[in-house]
Image (tube, coloured by chain):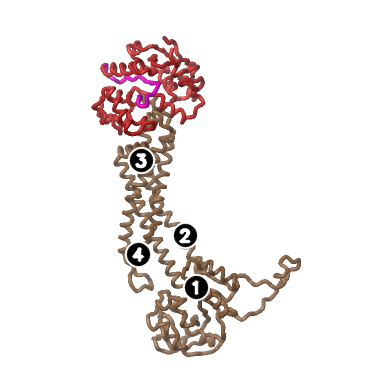
Amino acid sequence: MTEAVIEAEGLTRRLAGEVTVTLVEDATLAVHQGEFVAITGASGSGKSSLLYLLGLLDRPTSGQIWLRGDETSTLEEDTLADLRLAEVGFVFQFHFLLPEFSALENVMLPMQRLGRLQQPEIGARATELLDRLGLAGEAGKLPRQLSGGQSQRVAIARALANDPLLILADEPTGNLDTVASANVQRILMDLARDYGRAVVVVTHDRDFAAAADRVIVMSDGKIRSSA
Amino acid sequence: MIGLMPVIALKHLLARRRQSLVSLSGIVLGVAFFLAVSSLMQGSENDFIRRLVDNSPHVTIQDEFRNPRLQPVEQLYPSGAIEVRRVKPLTETRGIRGYPQILEGLRSQPALRASPVLAGQALVSFAGKDIAVSLNGMIPAEVNDVSTIQNYMIAGSVDALTGNPDGIILGDALARKLSLALGENVTVTAPTGVVHTFKILGIFHTGRADYDNTQTFADLKRVQALLKRVNRANTIIMKLDDPHRAHAVAEGIERRFGYKSVSWQEANEDLMSTLTTRNIIMYTVVSAVLIVAAFGIYNVISTVVLEKQRDIAILKSMGFRARDIRRIFLIQGLLLGFVGSALGLPFGAGLMLGLMQIRLKFPGGSDPVPLPMDWNWPQFAIAAAFAMGAALCAGLLPARKAAGVQPVDILRGAQ
């Protein structure tokens, strides 16, 4: 078995209030390099909440998360932000591209923030990523000039910009037509199989889930099965 | 190369071009009016102080002591157990003792001109009218060194006193009251009962009614004789090359000679504090203009923060830190402040030029003069700094709010 990119043990996330809401309860899982994992379940079962916890975007009420073997629960917000920048790539149901920036600029943003590459290298890598995702001619277009499928592919390119180990996708095909959906599905699976990324996808699409290496089924915030 | 955060900030502002322009014009107008009004006020203050400095002695030694002199026993035993009460001080003849020696000491100092004055009350009589005046005895050859009275002469000259010790110079208001003209004789009676006839050698007009009505100038020796105070002077007036040293110089003289020495700042303390109060009021009013403009900036940035909640969440999910987000919105405030200042300063300078075209005739002045404006760089710097500060403060709250956005809350709501 390859090294676990992300591991979680006993993850629980509750929202405090007049009535305490449990989003995720006692979730334990590990996702390895090159593994493609699908999380399914009914709406409100805690799939997205688990994804945000795994992506270090939210803090668990209890439990621990290890990213490449390093425990993250005691880390400060800035350190978590740095880890997200370098190691995690998010893709959401809606593309969430910044509307004032072109496709190319959107892909360049994470690299510019990380500052690992010089500006010409950043431009070259962003262009290469867009090319790889079939968007060679769309680099200069603003998000409003792109179709839903194209925008989602730009969002995937942006998630890949800093070459992260972990790709987290929250219903990435939920807003796309069949053709665009199949295209995005293929790209995400290729990322795991051909490029060795750990990919976790939250999806309602049974066919998409069936194609995954492993399917985690959730209900009421708990992991009911993992196979 | 421009950093990433300024680029994002600029794109946000350009995306809301109309609102950004409205808030920008607020800052431009605010800076322009701040600059024009503060320059006008500072200019008039400088003009006022210049007139004050020019027209009054920079330091005046008076024939009195700031604090009563201590009795010898008090000097010898400052913490003695016995207190001496009801000691009547020795009656002294009024006047500065040994004023020639003091003058000698003063004249040895560089950048300082000093001259003795014996001032006293007298009655000027002509054609059956008697008017009380202040008679100033001065050394004619030194008058122009320590006084600007020559600048206000409308007839005759101060120098004429040098050749005629029986001459007198008086104000035009007094001359008018007594129907006197240059070259005419006037009778002056001292409180001592001595009467002397003077010839009018000069008439001045300062524009200050009190001064033009009551002040007269004559030869020191003649006034000493008239007041029966031979070899006495009760004031020494001084002019310095650097009037702003007056306070320190006065302190030094008082320490050295004991007599009360008053600088022009001390003599006009009430006017100076009025100027300070006026400045506080002026800066409060013109600052209010910029503060209102800053609310415009606050409004724009707050709207951007509200509209960009989802983008902020995405940037944070990408790995942007809270401080990066804060910086983006602070930069927006600063950008509006900077551009507002850059456009507002030339606009303000234009307003200043416009104001300078207005000419007013001040009381006592013979010709209309332009409004005094202060064109020095600190006025421009203060206006720009205040605008930048106001813009930064306006960006602060929305920036903090943006930095505190919890991405998960926004993303959950957006799904």
Magenta includes A168? yes
Instruction: Specify few, some or many for label 4: CA neighbours under 10 Å numbering under 14, 14-19, or 20 or more.
Output: many
Tell me the number on the disc at residue B112.
1
Which quadrant: the N terminus of chain A? top left
Q: Name the residue carrying label 3.
A: B300
Amino acid type of the residue tagged 2 in the rendering: Thr
Of discs 4 and 2, which sits in the foreground? 4
Q: Name the residue carrying label 4.
A: B371
Q: Name the residue carrying label 2.
A: B277
Mark found first going from the N terminus, 3 or 2? 2
Mark 1 residue element = strand
Q: Is residue A46 left or right of residue B233?
A: left
Extreme residue toward the left, this view: A137
Mark found first going from the N terminus, 4 or 2? 2
Mark 4 residue element = loop
Gap between marks 1 and 4, in whole Å? 32 Å
Q: Which chain is brown?
A: B
Tell me the number on the disc at residue B278.
none
Mark found first going from the N terminus, 3 or 1? 1
